[in-house]
Image (cartoon, rainbow, N blue to C red):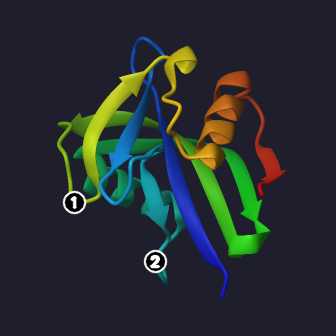
């Protein structure tokens, strides 16, 4: 069964990106997750970001759509701006850290590294990619 995912690229005033360290394994990723039934992807990303980080965000624009055929996933990557809330850990994220683009941890999920590179390289057009 195909699933939809929605993830956020959230930048601070220094153009650092917010990453979440997962509680289920030693990996970093963009905040986000599964789109629930009857939910729009932009609604899902706002919900997931608040659940995982404590931040409320305004969804700015779609910056990428990724097909992951072997997992039957379609993933939306959105540029978001923090509008409120406060960073806090969650059952899914035991660390939340802002990273400069050249400081992304080596244990970041590879698909997310690719999405981060795309976001920093071109936020003016929507990326359409197949990820393995």
Q: Which residue is mark 1?
A: 91
Image height of 129 relative to 114, above or below:
below
In the figure, residue 85 lies in which quadrant?
top left
- Residue 13, quarter of picture: top left
Mark 2 crowd level (few <14, some 14–19, many ≥20, 10 Å Cα): few
Secondary structure at badge 2 equals loop
Left or right: residue 2 versus residue 54 is right
Q: CA distance from mark 2 to mark 1?
A: 19 Å
Q: Residue at x 72, y 23 (%)?
A: 121
Quarter the N terminus occupies: bottom right
Q: Residue at x 36, y 42 (%)?
A: 20
Q: Position of residue 84 (x, y in %)?
A: 23, 37
Quick one: which residue is furthest to the bottom in this view?
1
Q: Residues within 10 Å of mark 1 (few under 14, many from 20)?
A: few
Name the residue beneath numbered marker 2: 36
Q: Nearer the viewer, residue 81 or 75?
A: 75
How many numbered markers are drawn? 2
Q: Nearer the viewer, residue 84 or 98?
A: 98
Q: Could you say which is closer to the camera, residue 71 or residue 87?
A: 71
Q: Judge from the rendering whether residue 70 lies leftward or rightward of residue 13; answer left or right.
A: right
Residue 100 placement (x, y as % from top left): 48, 17
> Which residue is at the far top?
14
Q: Mark 2 or mark 1, which has the lower sequence index? A: 2
Q: Position of residue 14 (x, y in %)?
A: 42, 11
Front residue of 97/123: it is 97
Residue 91 position within the rendered picture, expressed as x and y whole percent measured from the top left: 21, 60
Q: Residue at x 29, y 45 (%)?
A: 56
For the C terminus, give its image quadrant: bottom right
């Amino acid at each position: 069964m195909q699933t939809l995912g929605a993830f956020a690229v959230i930048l601070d005033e220094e153009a650092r990106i917010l990453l979440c360290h997962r509680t289920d394994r030693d990996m970093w990723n963009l905040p986000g997750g599964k789109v629930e039934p009857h939910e729009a992807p932009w609604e899902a990303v706002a919900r997931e970001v608040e659940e995982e980080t404590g931040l409320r965000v305004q969804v700015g624009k779609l910056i990428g759509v990724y097909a992951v055929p072997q997992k039957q996933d379609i993933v939306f990557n959105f540029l978001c701006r923090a509008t409120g809330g406060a960073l806090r850990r969650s059952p899914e994220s035991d660390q939340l850290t802002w990273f400069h683009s050249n400081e992304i941890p080596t244990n970041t999920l590879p698909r997310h590294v690719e999405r981060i590179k795309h976001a920093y390289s071109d936020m003016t057009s929507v990326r359409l990619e197949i990820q393995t």
